[in-house]
Amino acid sequence: MNVEQFQGMLEEKGIQLNSLQLDMFERYFQILVEWNEKMNLTAITEKEEVYLKHFYDSVSAAFYIDFKGEMKICDVGAGAGFPSIPLKICFPNLSITIVDSLQKRIRFLEHLSNELNLKDTYFYHDRAETFAKRVEFREQFDVVTARAVARMSVLSELCLPLVKKGGQFIAMKAANAEDELKAAHKAIHQLGGELASIHSFELPIEESERNIVVLNKVKNTPKRFPRKPGTPNKLPLE
């Protein structure tokens, strides 16, 4: 996906990027590649692949969720900033909080944010299990996102405790999302969530399957969740 295709395909979805925003994506790509030579941020470094598999894929959440209003978003395990930084570039009104367990990734994100002159972006070096226990963050976010390979039962335990009642958790998944949802049904209910929708589409050009799972937070998460660090992954809720 070249820059013109990126711009045009987003425009088809009602997302219009100005020259400043396009420059920010270009700078994002340059910084990502520069830092990737020093630390492992991504296996994808070809420009057209970065625009497709990182930038476009991240923004695809906005095809189904309205990000145009004032909104507090937490991105759990964002890695090199996906999906929250591309969403922030497209929708400057968003307040973005990123939590990641690796300090070096947080350093990269702080540098990126400064270089792109992003406002209302906050970065925390922490594990999701302990971050969600902090009173200033627990059930404080309108939307929590995760673009991760962990199963839905694990992601739900890490993310739903951060979503405020009436908010949403958005999980960006590849294939098998429906099977994961069935397996995680009881866990999601236990954590105060319920399935709102699942949106399936093919990533353009390479035509690989993508799923955007949206959970509504309908009741408060019991205080015992998330469990101590490492437990959700080792012993997923059933």
Image (tube, helix red, strand yellow):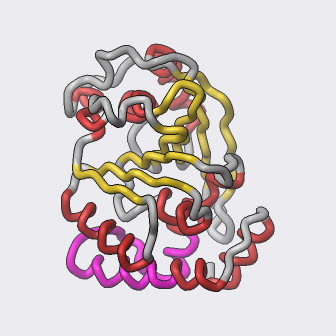
User: Which residue is at 66% across, 37% downward?
Assistant: 198
Q: Indicate whether 208 appears above or below 145.
A: below
Percent position (x, y) of residue 115?
Answer: 38, 79
Read off the magenta span: 26-52
Residue 53 appears in the rendering: no
In depth, the one of 50 and 29 nearer the eye is: 29
Snapshot quadrant of residue 14? bottom right
Residue 118 is drawn in which quadrant? bottom left
For image coordinates 23% across by 45% down, the residue present is 126
Q: Find residue 75 and report its horizontal and vertical position in percent.
A: 43, 49
User: Looking at the image, which residue is at 59% across and 78% down?
Assistant: 21
Inspect this view and state whether residue 20 appears: yes
Where in the figure is residue 120, as x and y percent of width and height? 44, 59
* Main secondary structure found in the magenta portion: helix
Going 61% across and 51% down the picture, which residue do you hit?
210
Q: Judge by depth and name the residue closer to the eye, 120 or 182.
A: 120
